[in-house]
């Protein structure tokens, strides 16, 4: 009856997806090959959260949740909060330009708040082979270099951060306009991971060939916090 509905409503107001999100701007939509700017861009997945199993990845755009359209970023927290905890729901995402549906089971917001506040980037340290000598490349107003022991120490970058380090940003360049700073790490370009300065150059060249006007960069801070920025490739 009504009491059950109220109780259920009270409990379901606290659904939690465990992602950090950003709005999808026109530039981001264009860089991902989306016809229109819509949805919520996943900027990070919280460790130990409901989708920390590869279901949803940073760089995915959530456009539909449990049958409800997510037209703007702010729609997502509302529809998640109104969905039932513990029930598997369909989530439509755009990944690398392709729409796909994934099944997600929501967690409880209370549990999520504890996890989110305890997030301090204690990922397993990767003791890989010694990286080769630093080679650098200049692109879009940035100088990028190998991320190795030397550059990690110089910029104070955490061991779990991987990608290509930005060693310099040219004043008044497209990168500088976007607030990109030396010491940030490029982990992906247009949803493809990069590991070397050559990867960065190749990826930008490929996007230009495809006629893209913007490159979508996933940047990691020194501590591993992710954010997305688009840079014009004029």
Image (spheres, grey):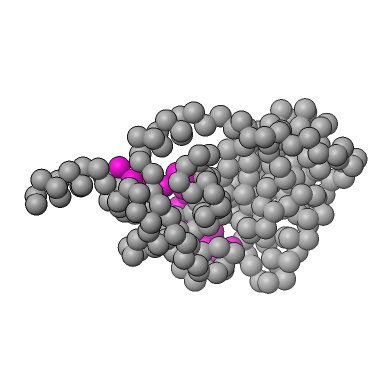
Place of residue 223 in the rendered image (x, y in percent of width and height, measured from the top left): 62, 32
Which residues, given as a range, are shown in magenta?
14-31
How many numbered marks, from 0 up? Answer: 0
Q: Is residue 24 magenta?
A: yes
Residue 73 visible in this rendered orientation of the protein: no
> In the shown orientation, is residue 193 left or right of residue 120?
right
Place of residue 69 in the rendered image (x, y in percent of width and height, measured from the top left): 35, 63
Place of residue 131 in the rendered image (x, y in percent of width and height, measured from the top left): 86, 40
Residue at 30 percent of width and 51 percent of height: 84
Residue at 56 percent of width and 45 percent of height: 227
Q: Which of 223 and 25 is in front in this view?
A: 223
**Residue found at the very far right of the displayed protein:** 133
> In the shown orientation, is residue 8 left or right of residue 143?
left
Quarter placement of the C terminus: bottom right
When asked about the image quadrant of residue 123, the answer is top right
Q: Which of 227 and 15 is in front in this view?
A: 15
Q: Nearer the viewer, residue 198 or 129?
A: 129
> In the shown orientation, is residue 72 left or right of residue 217?
left
Q: Is residue 36 above or below residue 177?
A: below
Q: Is residue 137 above or below residue 71?
A: above
Residue 88 visible in this rendered orientation of the protein: yes
Place of residue 140 in the rendered image (x, y in percent of width and height, measured from the top left): 72, 53
Residue at 35 percent of width and 61 percent of height: 66
Q: Is residue 79 magenta?
A: no
> In the shown orientation, is residue 113 left or right of residue 171?
left
């Amino acid at each position: 009856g009504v009491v059950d509905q109220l109780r259920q409503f009270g409990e379901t107001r606290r659904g939690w997806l465990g992602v950090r999100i950003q709005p999808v701007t026109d530039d981001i939509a264009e860089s991902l090959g989306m016809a229109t700017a819509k949805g919520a861009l996943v900027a990070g997945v919280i460790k130990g959260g409901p989708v920390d199993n590869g279901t949803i990845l940073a760089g995915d755009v959530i456009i539909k949740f449990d049958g409800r359209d997510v037209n703007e970023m702010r729609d997502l927290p509302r529809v998640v909060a109104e969905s039932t905890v513990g029930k598997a729901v369909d989530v439509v995402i755009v990944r690398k330009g392709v729409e796909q549906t994934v099944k997600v089971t929501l967690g409880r917001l209370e549990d999520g708040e504890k996890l989110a506040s305890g997030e301090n980037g204690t990922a397993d340290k990767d003791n890989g082979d010694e990286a080769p000598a630093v080679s650098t490349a200049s692109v879009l107003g940035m100088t990028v270099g190998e991320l190795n022991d030397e550059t990690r120490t110089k910029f104070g970058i955490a061991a779990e951060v991987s990608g290509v380090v930005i060693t310099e940003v040219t004043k008044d360049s497209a990168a500088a306009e976007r607030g990109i700073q030396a010491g940030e790490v490029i982990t992906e370009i247009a949803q493809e991971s990069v590991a070397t300065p050559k990867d960065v150059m190749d990826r930008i060249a490929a996007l230009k060939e495809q006629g893209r006007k913007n490159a979508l960069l996933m940047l990691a801070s020194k501590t591993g916090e992710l954010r997305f920025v688009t840079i014009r490739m004029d």
